[in-house]
Image: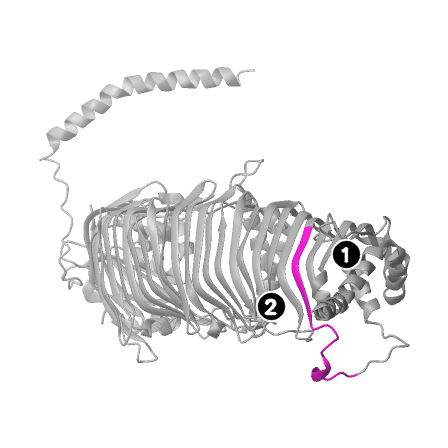
Amino acid sequence: MKISIWLKRIFIAILALPFVAITGFLLWFEADKFRSDLEQLVADATPLTLSIQSPIEYSLGDPYLITFRDIDLRYQETTILGLERFALRIDEISLFKREITLAGISLDRPEVDLSPEMLDQLVDDFSEPDEIAQPVAVDDSEAAIFLSALSLKQLDIDGLSLRWEDLDKPIRLKELTVSVTDWDLIRDAAIVPENWHLAIYLFAEEVSWQQHVATDLTVHGLMSEASVQITDASINLLSGELALKSTTSLTDNFATRIHELTLSNIKLSDSILGLTATPSAEQEPKEQAVHSEHQPIQIPKIDLPISSLIVETATLSNIHYSSDVVSTGAKVEGLTFEAKQLAIISDSQIAPERLSGELSLAIDRFSYPPHTIEAIGAKLSIADGAAKLTESSLKALDGTIELAATAALEQGLPLVVDNLTVSNVKLSDELWRSEPSDDGTDSKAQDGESQDIEIEKQAEPAKADEAETLLPLRSLNIKQVTINDLALTLSEPSFATENLSLALSELAPVQEYHLIGYPDILKQPFVFTLDGAKIEAVGHKVDTLNVSLSGGQPFKLDQVKVTGPAAQIDLSGNVETQNSELPFSIISNAKQVDLSLLDPLDTGYPLAGRVNIKTEIKGEAASVDALISSLNGPIHIDGQNFTLQNIDIDTTLDNFLDSQELTLTDVGAFALLGPIGLAVSKAKAISGAAAGALAGGDTKFADADLHLVFTDGVMKFENSAIATQEHRIALFGQINLPQSQFEKLTTTVLDEKACVRLARSIDGPFSGPDVQVASAITGTVTGLFSGVFSGTEKYFGDGCEPVYQGRVKPPKQFDFEANAEKLQQEENALLEQLPEAARFAELEMKKAQAEMAP
């Protein structure tokens, strides 16, 4: 029994001997003796200099086995890492298992100070090959080491300060706390063990970059050989908060999935976004635009080292932005943005055809003084290489605007406007007019003048280069546009309306980078309607306006209807677009047309009164020249009681008929009896001859009945006459618009039997026509009616043959006997005023003589 007991004791002692030896070694070990050796080892093996300024502490009773204090790590005489305390705790029992378990590592107040340049040099120094040691190839099977396991149970870094001294964007982290738990560095004697994992906790009191500061950076994460997962991360920045949850795969080329991203209550500004006003930079694109080549809209593909990036949910809420760069005093208030299942990167590319997701945007208010846009909202769906704006709306200018559109995400960005609706908007050119400058002038107007000069200088080179202008947009297809109750006010030209509505559908104005012009635009199968009320344009009022037209083959002008104080107009027509000559026909009926509408012709002899105009015109609209030379059809003008101002035709004719003399000035005045010809020819040389003699006089027309017939651009007067208060005047002959000349345009003064009393003919080019006169009184005939009448003698004198059979009657002669009493009353009233007028004239004369006296 005793032998058995001693054998057991000896066996136990033998087993305990290694533990006693290790324990004795640990108790006897003096760590500080190796401080200089450790510093020398770092200096020999690396380009760094290690300085441990306090003794190394070693204690079995302390929570940490070994403690280093006041550590300074230098590179090129510059401290890149300062550390107050580094403590290490090892699970001693694990050593008996050929394992090392780091029960804890603690770092207190480390300070890291680096710059990009220094880091590049440091990496280069570590990358230099060792002249002594030669690389040895090691098989994966030999990747096992003496230790069977090395694990880190707890790593705590407290109070880390990081300064990244990039001169452009310096970054600083203050009071950063990092915690890592359960990290298996070696398992089963493999340096890269399978199924390793660790947990990370990170907190930074302050993060600064440039002039910006963020606080309370918190990150909770899990990391394994398969992925890095941020279970919860947040930071307070720009007066708001950012939060993130994500997973990044380490086995699938860093494929990243953002589970949740929120950004709320952020306040942005120009300085934060790096925006600055650069007027000179704005001018460069304008100068380059004149000479630059065609640059279609490009959506590039971008290669990245990440295989995929998917955002499951991203929300930006209550974002505010103030800017003086976008516009002085511009503000965005209450911006909210949301993204769902947004695939940004696929197959290591940002490729338009692979983008997908759902986006929504809402803005409470966007203001750029003095204008404000409210309630902005939009929803965008991206899939199959296209971005579809399913709905969008905003409130502005006292109305609402809604838009739905689709854009193909490819070169040129082909765009389809599915629906655009504008309702109750009040639009004015004040929106784009600039504020007056300090000297009282319009700064935009001044800019416009300078731009006009510049354009004029460049006009000649632009003409020399006849290359067709291409647009950056590949195509634009308008499916539906509706404008309801638009109020529009313009100052130049003067225009105002309180109620304008229009609808447009199926129009493609841009195709293959070209803006579709005339006549191709007419061939498209679009439909356009326009309805307006209470319109005032250039001083004229329109009660209602209705326009309806449709493109295609043919192009149809279904209706143009205008009602108002100035006229009532009905017009319709069509263009045969399948024919290259573009034959057209127009039928119009204009009633009670205010002749003041002709004032813009500026003949110097305005008309006042009203007429009716009917037309049935046909022609070809391929070009302006073709239009003029192809006009065919009748025009009928009739009216009563209108006035031709600045001319007294009756007085001129009476003077001639009484004196039987006709001066050149009278001839010039008489030439004005053909106002239509003058309006077409602009023959002011003729009209100007009468201006001095007849200025201030008026001619009152009692009746007019003009029948004009176009034949291949030649306008012929048929059975046309006008009646003044004293004379009836008939018109014959032609105006050849293609040749710009008069062709025996003859004006005749008729007697009561419609025989010729006096005739005037204009023949030749508009610029210098030949004027001839024939008189029944003087008996002079100068070949006037050659080509107009088959003979001359039968139209003059007794027994003449009438030349006019129309409805215009000769004016009634004034009945002196019937108006004798009225004439006497007017004479008496005039005589009563004469004494007072004489006295006034005498006083004025005396006053003038007194002023002239020496």
Q: Tell me which amino acid carries mark 1.
A: Ser
Which residue is disc 1 drawn over? 115
Q: Position of residue 629 (x, y in %)?
A: 34, 73
Nearer to the camera, 834 or 309 = 309
**Residue 281 placement, left or right of 133:** left
Nearer to the camera, 537 or 153 = 153
* In this view, 37 is above or below 333: below
**Residue 157 placement, left or right of 404:** right
Secondary structure at numbered mark 2: loop
| Magenta region | 137-157
Which residue is disc 2 drawn over? 292
Judge the density around disc 1: few (<14), some (14-19), many (≥20) Cα neighbours within 10 Å: some
The N terminus - image quarter: bottom right
Residue 142 magenta-highlighted: yes
Q: Quick check: marks 2 and 1 in contact, CB under 8 Å? A: no
Q: Which quarter of the picture shows residue 557?
A: bottom left
